[in-house]
Amino acid sequence: MESGLSESGWKRTLADRSFWVVVAIFAVTAFLHYFRTDLLPALVNTFLTRHAVDRILFVLPITIATYAFGLRGGVIALAAIVAVMLPRAIWISPSPVDALIETAAAAAVGYFVVRIIDAQAREKALRQEADARQLQIQQRLNEVAEQITSELELDRVLTKVIQIAEELTGADGGGIALFDRERESIRYPYLHNLPQELAEVTFSKGEGVAGEVMDTGSPVVVVDYQAYPSIIPAFAEAGLTSVVAVPIVSGDRVFGALSLVSTDKAKCFFDSDVAILTSIGRQAGIAIENARLYERMRFYARQITRAQEDERKRVARELHDETVQMLIALSRRLESLAALPDPLPEAALERLATLQELIGTTLQGVRHYIQDLRPPTLDHLGLVATIEGLTDDLKEDGIDAELGVSGAARRLTLEAELALFRIVQEALNNVRRHSGASHALVQVRFSPDSVRIRIKDDGHGFNAPARMDDLVSTGKLGLVGMYERARTLGGTLAVQSAPGEGTVVIVDVPAGADEAD
């Protein structure tokens, strides 16, 4: 391609050049066809007396025109050349019949060349289209693999898997069926472009297309679902016409089935469609296995967290009931010593004052430690009062901290209040230790269906990862803990930050975390 020309400009330039090449060859061949010239060797002139060669030479501009402009260009060139050859064959040639036969033969050869070149061009276009299609399929399969390896929430990834499978096979809808080992039943918890009521339909292993796939471990293609022997009535009523299903597997384990359907009219699912879906089914199997392992890990993490919180509560209670009380008693005994009827020496009084100050400092430290372990206000006064205590602590460290509450404040479950307290505590600790902020704002908003807490500071900020899953690799384990605590409540946590723009942490918890009346 010439420098400075766009692809479309280059194509126009090439077409223009091809046009003039065709015109030039056409003109030269027409000249040879009608005029004798002494410039040509005698042998060639003798050979051209019947004008058979120049009639064959007319195939050259037809060939170039077909290559340059396609079937239409070749036919136009052929028609023009036949129009040029006919006058000589009819009115000038001494042998009109032979000339017409040769002209017809030349036209037939030209038309044959046009068809061959057009067929080659179509075949090339089909190959390019097939290659492009294969590339698109591979890209989409790579997208499925990337999403599966980067996402552990089944609800998020499997619906996307169905959509990609529909796109690659031209299906009208689809779903993923899973086998419930406890209930020994199958249902479609993930559907796309199908009535959501079908998600509640359960059937036994071996029934329906999905049941057959799970039973045999092999793909199943049903062109006419209404005539399928193991039809599920609810799916038939939904208008399913054709169905293809492949097993969702990981290793030797079959987790379920990926099904694609047509609803408007019968559709033929080809072997290539089955191969694509089989590949996607393997990826979905990996996703399900990873998600189940991750769910087990989260269960154990929740158990460990509960155990930690219970231990913190025990330690905090013992510190409050024993250590704090002993320090208070010790302080009072020192006060009683200083108030004895017989005055103590000045040096002793100074020592007593120093000891009392040390006990006071220790007592304050223990109370802060209790607050960090398990603030008593959380159990007695609730989340808002406890967060207010955290903002007051931040003020003592020289950071202007505010607390704003909107909506009708209410108590949440103890687990929810504890998790939200830990999230706010960690966020404000980050403000204190890392942000360099001078101001922080905590906003708690109660709405009928959720509770939202927003923590904003004007500190240095940082490059927040695009996904929470990247926090582990960046070493931000405090944020990972906040994220996991939000997820244990069925909520979400988002971190918005950039260098020089401060940080915003937003946690949303659904109304299910409300305390029962």
Image (cartoon, rainbow, N blue to C red):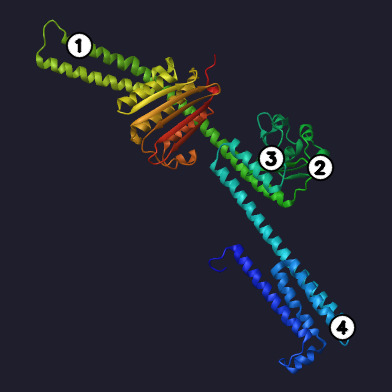
Query: Mark 1 — residue?
Result: 335
Q: Quadrant of residue 161?
A: top right
Q: Earlier in the sequence, mark 1 or mark 4?
A: 4
Indicate left or right for 90 with 477 as reference: right
Question: Can residue 374 be seen in the rendering of this structure?
Answer: no
Q: Earlier in the sequence, mark 1 or mark 2?
A: 2
Q: Secondary structure at mark 1?
A: helix
Numbered mark located on residue 91 in the image: 4
Label 1 with label 4: CB-CB less than 8 Å: no
Q: Amino acid at mark 4?
A: Trp
Q: Residue at x 86, y 86 (%)?
A: 93
Numbered mark located on residue 224 in the image: 2
Residue sticking out furthest to the right: 97
Marks 1 and 2 sit apart, C-alpha to C-alpha, by 94 Å
Marks 2 and 3 sit apart, C-alpha to C-alpha, by 19 Å
Q: Nearer the viewer, mark 1 or mark 2?
A: 2
Instruction: Please rate how many residues cluster around mark 4, counting C-alpha atoms within 10 Å: few if below 14, some from 14 to 19, many from 20.
Output: few
Residue sticking out furthest to the bottom: 42
Q: Nearer the viewer, residue 503 or 372?
A: 503
Q: Residue at x 16, y 11 (%)?
A: 338
Numbered mark located on residue 257 in the image: 3
Q: Nearer the viewer, mark 4 or mark 2?
A: 4
Q: Amino acid at mark 2?
A: Asp
Q: Secondary structure at mark 4?
A: helix
Label 4 with label 2: CB-CB less than 8 Å: no
Q: Residue at x 74, y 82 (%)?
A: 29
Q: Earlier in the sequence, mark 2 or mark 3?
A: 2
Q: Secondary structure at mark 2?
A: loop
